[in-house]
Image (spheres, grey):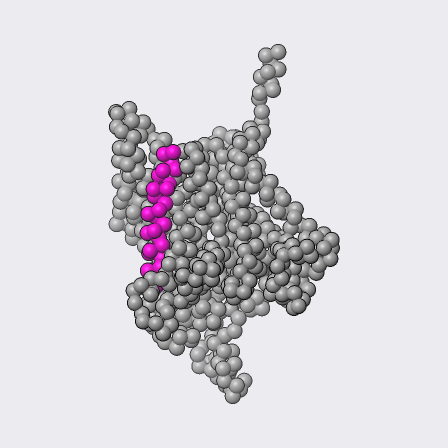
């Protein structure tokens, strides 16, 4: 187990290192470089100044050398300054991460809490009208474009009914209170929850149906266990194993959802931060935020692997992989 | 008499699959809808001609007009006809979905076949690569790829200046990250197929690795590949629409269902109905592709019940 964990950790680190180079290289291909931006900000700069600045910042160096310099500084804890926010990158990052954790955490819990009963019910009432309806709703949830869903919710609740704010985190000029902030969270959370509940329900249903076909379920029934005991005691516990894994793997998708939702609702989280940083040529911030997102996704995968073995003692990490 | 009865009952696998597919009502309806929407989108120039409309011509005197006989779905913020623009947008969105899915599936099939059939270190490297791509934050990566300045990549000027460059670009970048599902699927199946007797027989006869992969292994994998590819189209259309919505995908004046929604958020107070049509078109089309994939799965792969 320890050996396996170490292997996986090492593998994740390699992916992360490769990823950081690829992203660094891709960022270099984005339109405009830092010196161009300085020139456009200060018309008094001459062409000679630009060349001098380029040398000063090491931008005339080959990409590999620049990357190594960036990496050395980053490992030493120096992630540079954010151009857009005019602050060290990490001071911008932490509050955004906190906001995203709140948003994603609540929607994730809501989605799972709703998907579990729906998926279980659909699985044990297979091919009935209810199963059909739940399936239909799940497919609708998977297929709806989340940005359009957000627009629909804004149209309905902010424009037509006028009961909920369309964007931001608190009423401008108002007293900040828990309820005021909560009101601003309702629509983003609803968007993210609806966007992920469909696939979650289908995971649960599929896992539950698979388990209900197993021999030990037939054995439990043959021994005279009540249907409720079969479902809750025998089937659910086994069906949860793949569900937990897939939920942990789903983290990366949730992050993509956060980017869309946060951007539309002007919610200051990691998703909006990454988007704004990329669009605003804020290389340092984009780079670090991106690596953060990758680390979180890799962690999700790692947690999925560990949870799998922990929940199902039959899986051994020794041989095979 | 009896032989006749038996003969009329025996059917090919494909006929059986067809029968099973027809039982999946939602999939059949979805298939019909998709054929209809493809034909309708393809006939955009015809409607333009018949209704005497120019899809790209602005007319500021008729901004935001409601639907009437001349403009079936009304006009947008520049006074352009929404209906015809929706059809042109549909052409692009459907094209991107279908072509990207095919490119990604081809890429995934090749990688999966090589990994599964060759095995060894090549398999290890290719599968670690697959794992790595899956573990990347998809949307931020696509946004970076979509924002890249192509003149810095050393591509020929003729390609960069092309009017359809945003179309090629989105097909390329989504395919680059979208091949993993098919690759894993094909690799797993190829791994077990290569141990089978008919592959051994082919090897003994001296067939080349390429021939074994393409003639003996690939045909056995075609059903799961078709299912996975169909199921991926919906996702790709969603990705295209969100990138275009963010202003990074298909660039105006070329219309797509996604970029028709780009201004929707600003117009939400003045003309909320403009945000409705493209969104509902994406929604219904994506759900139809998902139902179609589900139906194909039931029909082609009856044992898998997911």
How far across and down, in percent of the image, does residue A63 sit? 47, 70
Residue at the extreme bottom of the image, as rendered:
A44
Image point (26%, 25%), residue name: A224
How far across and down, in percent of the image, does residue B289 sit? 54, 44
Main SS of the magenta part reads helix
Magenta stretch encompasses residue A105: yes
Relative horizontal placement of residue B174, taking residue B59 as reference (left or right):
left
Image point (52%, 81%), residue name: A40
Question: Which of A215 and A301 lies nearest the eye of the viewer?
Answer: A215
Give the number of callouts: 0
Residue at the extreme top of the image, as rendered:
B1
In the depicted structure, whether residue B151 falls above or below residue A240: below
Question: Which of B149 and A118 lies nearest the eye of the viewer?
Answer: A118
How far across and down, in percent of the image, does residue A1 sit? 26, 47
In the depicted structure, whether residue B12 falls above or below residue B181: above
Q: Which residues are magenta?
A: A97-125
Magenta stretch encompasses residue B191: no
How far across and down, in percent of the image, does residue A19 sit? 42, 60
Q: Quadrant of residue A270?
A: bottom left
Image point (60%, 20%), residue name: B8
In the depicted structure, whether residue A113 falls above or below residue B5: below
Relative horizontal placement of residue A178, taking residue A20 as reference (left or right):
left
Q: Quadrant of residue B65?
A: bottom right
Considering the image in quadrants, where does the C terminus of chain A appear?
top left
Question: Which of A39 and B200 lies nearest the eye of the viewer?
Answer: A39
Image point (37%, 66%), residue name: A169
On the question of residue A154 being in view, the answer is no
On the question of residue B198 being in view, the answer is yes
Question: Which of A181 and A43 lies nearest the eye of the viewer?
Answer: A181
């Amino acid at each position: 187990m320890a050996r396996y964990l170490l292997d996986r950790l090492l593998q994740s680190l390699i992916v992360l290192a490769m990823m950081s180079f690829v992203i660094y290289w891709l960022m270099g291909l984005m339109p405009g470089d830092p010196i161009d931006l300085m020139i456009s900000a200060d018309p008094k700069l001459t062409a000679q100044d630009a060349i001098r600045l380029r040398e000063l910042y090491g931008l005339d160096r080959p990409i590999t050398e620049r990357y190594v310099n960036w990496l050395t500084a980053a490992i030493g804890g120096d992630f540079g300054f954010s151009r857009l926010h005019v602050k060290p990158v990490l001071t911008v990052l932490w509050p955004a991460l906190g906001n995203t954790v709140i948003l994603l955490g609540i929607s994730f819990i809501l989605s799972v809490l709703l998907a579990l009963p729906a998926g279980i019910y659909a699985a044990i009432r297979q091919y009935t009208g209810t199963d059909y309806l739940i399936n239909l709703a799940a497919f609708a949830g998977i297929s709806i474009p989340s940005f359009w869903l957000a627009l629909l919710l804004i149209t309905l609740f902010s424009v037509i009914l006028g009961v909920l704010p369309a964007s931001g985190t608190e009423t401008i000029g108002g007293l900040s209170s828990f309820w005021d902030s909560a009101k601003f969270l309702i629509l983003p959370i609803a968007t993210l929850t609806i966007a992920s509940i469909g696939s979650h329900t289908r995971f649960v249903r599929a896992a539950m149906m698979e388990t209900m076909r197993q021999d030990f379920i037939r054995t439990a029934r043959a021994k005279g266990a009540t249907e409720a005991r079969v479902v809750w005691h025998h089937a659910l516990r086994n069906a949860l194993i793949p569900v937990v894994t897939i939920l942990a793997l789903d983290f990366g998708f949730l992050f993509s959802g956060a980017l869309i939702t946060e951007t539309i609702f002007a919610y200051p989280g990691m998703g909006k931060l990454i988007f704004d940083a990329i669009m605003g040529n804020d290389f340092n911030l984009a780079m670090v935020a991106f690596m953060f997102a990758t680390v979180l996704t890799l962690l999700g995968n790692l947690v999925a692997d560990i949870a799998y073995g922990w929940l199902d003692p039959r899986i051994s990490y020794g041989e095979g992989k | 008499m009896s032989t006749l009865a038996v003969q009329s009952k025996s059917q090919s696998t494909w006929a059986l699959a067809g029968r099973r597919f027809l039982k999946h009502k939602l999939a059949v309806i979805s298939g019909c809808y998709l054929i209809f929407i493809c034909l309708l989108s393809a006939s955009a120039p015809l409607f333009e001609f018949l209704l005497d409309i120019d899809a790209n011509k602005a007319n500021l005197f008729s901004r935001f007009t409601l639907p009437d006989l001349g403009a079936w779905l009304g006009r947008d913020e520049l006074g352009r006809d929404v209906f015809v623009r929706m059809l042109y947008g549909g052409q692009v969105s459907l094209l991107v979905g279908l072509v990207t899915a095919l490119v990604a599936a081809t890429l995934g099939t090749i990688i999966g076949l090589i990994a599964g059939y060759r095995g060894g270190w090549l398999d290890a490297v290719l599968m670690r690569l697959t794992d790595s791509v899956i573990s990347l934050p998809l949307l931020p990566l696509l946004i970076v790829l979509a924002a890249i300045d192509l003149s810095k990549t050393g591509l020929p000027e003729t390609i960069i200046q092309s009017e359809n460059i945003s179309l090629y670009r989105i097909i390329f970048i989504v395919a680059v990250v979208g091949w993993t599902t098919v690759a894993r699927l094909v690799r797993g199946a190829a791994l077990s197929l290569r141990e089978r007797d008919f592959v051994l027989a082919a090897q003994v006869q001296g067939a080349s690795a390429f021939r074994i992969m393409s003639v003996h292994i690939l045909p056995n994998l075609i059903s799961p590949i078709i299912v996975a590819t169909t199921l991926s189209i919906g996702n790709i259309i969603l990705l295209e629409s969100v990138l275009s919505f963010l202003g990074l995908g298909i660039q105006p004046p070329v219309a797509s269902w996604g970029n028709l929604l780009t201004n929707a958020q600003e117009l939400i107070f003045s003309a909320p109905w403009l945000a409705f049509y493209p969104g509902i078109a994406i929604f219904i089309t994506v759900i139809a592709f998902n139902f179609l994939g589900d139906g194909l799965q039931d029909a082609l792969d009856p044992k898998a019940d997911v």
